[in-house]
Amino acid sequence: MTNVSMQALKVFDAAARHNSFKLAADELNLTATNVSHHIKNLETRLGIELFIRKTREVTLTKAGADLAKATSSGFSTIERALHQLVEQSKCVVVHTTSSFAAQMLIPALRDFAKLNPDIDVSVITGEHLVHDNQAITIRFGDISHIETHQILSIEQFNLYLNPNLDGINPSTVFMPKWKNQSLSEAPWSAWLSQNQMNDKQHELITYDQELYCIQEAIAGAGCVFASHSLVNMLEQNGVLTCSAHQPVSSSLGYYLPSQEVRYSQQQQIFVDWLKKQFI
Amino acid sequence: MTNVSMQALKVFDAAARHNSFKLAADELNLTATNVSHHIKNLETRLGIELFIRKTREVTLTKAGADLAKATSSGFSTIERALHQLVEQSKCVVVHTTSSFAAQMLIPALRDFAKLNPDIDVSVITGEHLVHDNQAITIRFGDISHIETHQILSIEQFNLYLNPNLDGINPSTVFMPKWKNQSLSEAPWSAWLSQNQMNDKQHELITYDQELYCIQEAIAGAGCVFASHSLVNMLEQNGVLTCSAHQPVSSSLGYYLPSQEVRYSQQQQIFVDWLKKQFI
DNA sequence: AATTATACATGAGTAAAACTTATTTATAAC
DNA sequence: GTTATAAATAAGTTTTACTCATGTATAATT
């Protein structure tokens, strides 16, 4: 038993704006089921219907419309304030995956700090993708429907291995299998066919984070089928070396999900810098 | 990784109003620890300090004060609207424990429906106590610091048993041991001394809900040490009978936590009726 | 000055939301 | 009559919110 949850009201607000549970779900990166649950729950707790359900559309009741007016106004007041805080902040907050943070972002941040000593960067990692209006979010995923200016990289994949152990354990391949099931898989079979190989030549081991695969390869446990951005730094340092095979391109890459709210000045500086890191 | 959570902002709002994590926690029925976590989390995600911590007080920073202004205004806009919805509603929503709902409220609701055919009552049960400005909440707990007009009953406890099985299993006693640890225990030892008995004469079995204890007694598995309000209905129906011992009084009872917002007309009718049920 | 009490922080573990998947229903579109 | 779409329902999983135990700093009490 909880209070009328703010979470539910947020979901209601989105549903009211779209007149659709599905579109609200899309906006918030949820399932329509979950939206339905939230609204139902609200209605039960308030003892009043908020939407009239027809088969393929929902419309607000009078009560729903009244509430929507309030949530819209109330939440936007709060979000405006949050955004202004972020503008004032000396600190840029970045959300991204732990693999990207560890292999690319954190090592590169030294350079950023040198260029912008007055801007602190705080990195928050997690695999679950969320639409956050305040922070910068760097996502990994299918970039085929993402607008060009939001794309940071289009990833190529190839086999990499520890140069000191060249040839010792070439048949074991570590490969990411992303938790987020909407992602297409790493382009392993495309790579195989491009290099005229078949999958019987390799023993595959998958982890849900590319980072772990790379670490296994560094440890010499086998080679890793990884994206070029993540191993770039390691390749330069001579920790990993690229196999002699042809790299395969993919529709996967890093991108910045579109923001409703504009970046603050500091965030824009960070984003501009970030884009250069991939060139 | 979530969005800046609405939950956290609610907690922040309370903390800002009180200039104290502890008082905010009290208001929201949380622990100070939890408030501390929420605020910390917010600060991390926003990349900006909201409170200046001194040893026994916290004060808002400039940024915190700006945010507090917005949350205060935003949330109150929303809560006003919620309250108006409840006023319009034909349905009174009541939060209470499952024991109280099953043994007293639901059986009595027939009578209420007869008297007020135009008011629907929706009952939501749960043991966790929450401060809800929209719904009516009936709580069970220590009433020694509750104002008289909010108190519904002061409970007396005694042993009850199934009359058909009188004497069959008198040494087994089922007794509630409430989940909510801030509650004082059922006054078992006071009852024992009042009746010049010691605890070696009984085998005690505890459940976290009084309801289960009563059901065991109805099933004839033993007797139950219960509060008079809950067994009242069962006693009248001859399902349970009071033992010959002296009942013991307690500082436990049912009450209506104070509401910041006034009851709606319909809610007031329900509350007035409810109070009569205990006389 | 030593002792006690208070407000908050930290870390680890638990309980309760939130969320998802699988399945079903109703109906609009084809 | 099919197919496709939006939403509802039930059951299960994951994430978040929350608590407990403990520690720290300091104001208040003795």
Image (cartoon, coloured by chain):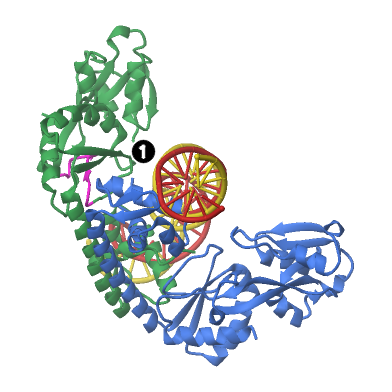
Chain colours: A green, B blue, C yellow, D red
The answer to whether residue B75 is left or right of residue B271 is left
Q: Which residues are magenta?
A: A133-146
Find disc 1 in the rendering and name its residue.
A179
- Using the rendered image of the protein, determine whether residue A19 is visible from the camera's viewpoint: no
In magenta stretch: residue A141: yes
In percent of width and height, residue A186 lies at 28, 31
Work out whether A235 lies above or below B52: above
Callout 1, which amino acid? Answer: Lys
Provide the chain ID for the residue under circle 1: A
Work out whether B264 lies above or below A39: below
| Residue depicted at x 27% and y 10% | A163
B138 vs A42, nearest the viewer: B138
Residue found at the very far bottom of the displayed protein? B115
The answer to whether residue A260 is left or right of residue B187 is left
A228 vs A111, nearest the viewer: A111
A69 vs A214, nearest the viewer: A69
Instruction: Locate residue A174: give its quadrant.
Output: top left
In percent of width and height, residue B275 lies at 58, 84
In percent of width and height, residue A140 lies at 24, 38
Instruction: Locate residue A90: give its quadrant.
Output: top left
- Using the rendered image of the protein, determine whether residue B115 is visible from the camera's viewpoint: yes
SS at circle 1: loop
